[in-house]
Image (cartoon, helix red, strand yellow):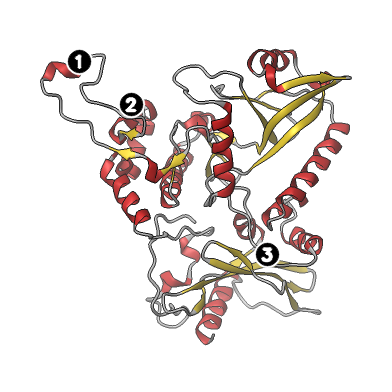
Amino acid sequence: MRRDIRNILGHVREHFDGIRVSRQYFHLEVLSFPFFRNKAAYIVGKVVNGLEETPFALPILNNEKGGLFVDALLLGEREIANVFSFARAYFMVDTDVPSAVVQFLRRLMPTKTKAELYSAIGLQKHGKTEFYRDFLHHLQHSGDEFVVAPGIRGMVMTVFTLPSFPYVFKVIKDAFPEPKRMTPKVVKQKYQLVKQHDRVGRMADSLEYSYAAFPLDRFSPELLKELQTEAASSITFDEGKLVIKHLYIERWITPLNIYMATAAEPELQQVIDDYGEAIKQLAAVNIFPGDMLFKNFGVTRHKRVVFYDYDEISYLTECNFRYIPEPPYPEFEMSAEPWYSIESNDVFPEEFPSFLLTNPRIRQIFLRLHADLLDADYWNRKQAMIRAGVVEDVFPYRTSKRFLIHEREPSTFVAPEGRRTAEPSALG
């Protein structure tokens, strides 16, 4: 306890530069129950100092000896919002009055909607209800048309959006062109896998609806034609409404390929680095994205790279990562057909550059930062760790926020004893 208090006070002194005066009615407001997720329990509250309010969260972890310790102090709306991100798994919270919890959290994170916060505390069905109420309200007070979403069109989904509403709507197509070899049922199973898995801040949450009605006169002719051509079995018409039998709704984020096309050098390096970190963090929780094209990833408003196209996703341990065998004769390399057998679950990481890194500028940055992703041994080591029961730490806050990394500083920060970490990256 003394160690944790020293660590917290040290961080407070760093965060609030200079002397802070306690004003009238200074106090702390703290929710009485923890928020559980993965390896952590979070204490959530706010500091009230006069008219100034500062949200905070204390992630509490367990060391290998069974002792509890405070791992960090997260201060401010942005750091708290990252912990409650739409790309993370829902919390487990034991509360009798969820509405009061959501009301309190909205004061800490005013940019979050009630729908997002109900889902974040594990009440996803009510979150869907709140979302649809907000959506209907927006339709009543807007006049723009639904249009085909910008970006490269996918093979599996028809994706459309309402420009004034920050979400995309995804409808499974009736048939998929080559090389897609799956059924709509399999696509639904993939999305369900993501829903039930740890998303580690790298996979966007999706809201699944059945028989959702939209005003027909709000659809652009181009979009209506695409739906009737590509997903006719999923739509019906009823008294001026277009009813979609099954669809997914996700928060709109800028596709990575579009973002990189206009990014300056510092921003480009940042997102390419975070793209590689996203793949590594997904691997840490036994997820292989499958289709790693840039168009299947997006950049959030906090410049974080998130995966959102799940039709090719699989468990990492289901893949067979291989090196390409040497050809028996040099002329075999010129053949249109491979000289080696390939199974459906085979993955050859050394082939990734041929379809991912065609831009020399992007290729140079990626190879400098994440060349290990092109090595089959890297992926096989990840598989071995998962099969051995090793659960890597992937934190929803920056490593620099952790008290543990300051263990060599003699006075302000003190690291807990017996703590071993296996961190895949500098970003939580």
**SS under mark 1:** helix
Q: Which mark is residue 93?
A: 3
Say which residue appears at 50% left-offset and 28% top-offset.
261
**Which residue has dot 2 on it?**
354
Residue 263, image x, y percentages:
50, 34
- The numbered mark, 2 or 3, whose residue comes first in the sequence reads 3
The residue type indicated by label 3 comes to Val
**Which residue has dot 1 on it?**
334
The residue type indicated by label 1 comes to Met
Gap between marks 2 and 1 measured at Cα:
16 Å
- The numbered mark, 2 or 1, whose residue comes first in the sequence reads 1
State the residue in front, 268 or 373.
Answer: 373
**SS under mark 3:** loop
Relative to 91, residue 21 above or below: below
**SS under mark 2:** helix
Relative to 232, residue 18 above or below: below
Circle 3 packing at 10 Å, graded few (<14), some (14-19), many (20+), is: some
Residue 122, image x, y percentages:
68, 56
Say which residue appears at 53% left-offset and 19% top-offset.
176
> Dividing the picture into quarters, in which one does residue 32 lie?
bottom right
Say which residue appears at 53% left-offset and 87% top-offset.
2
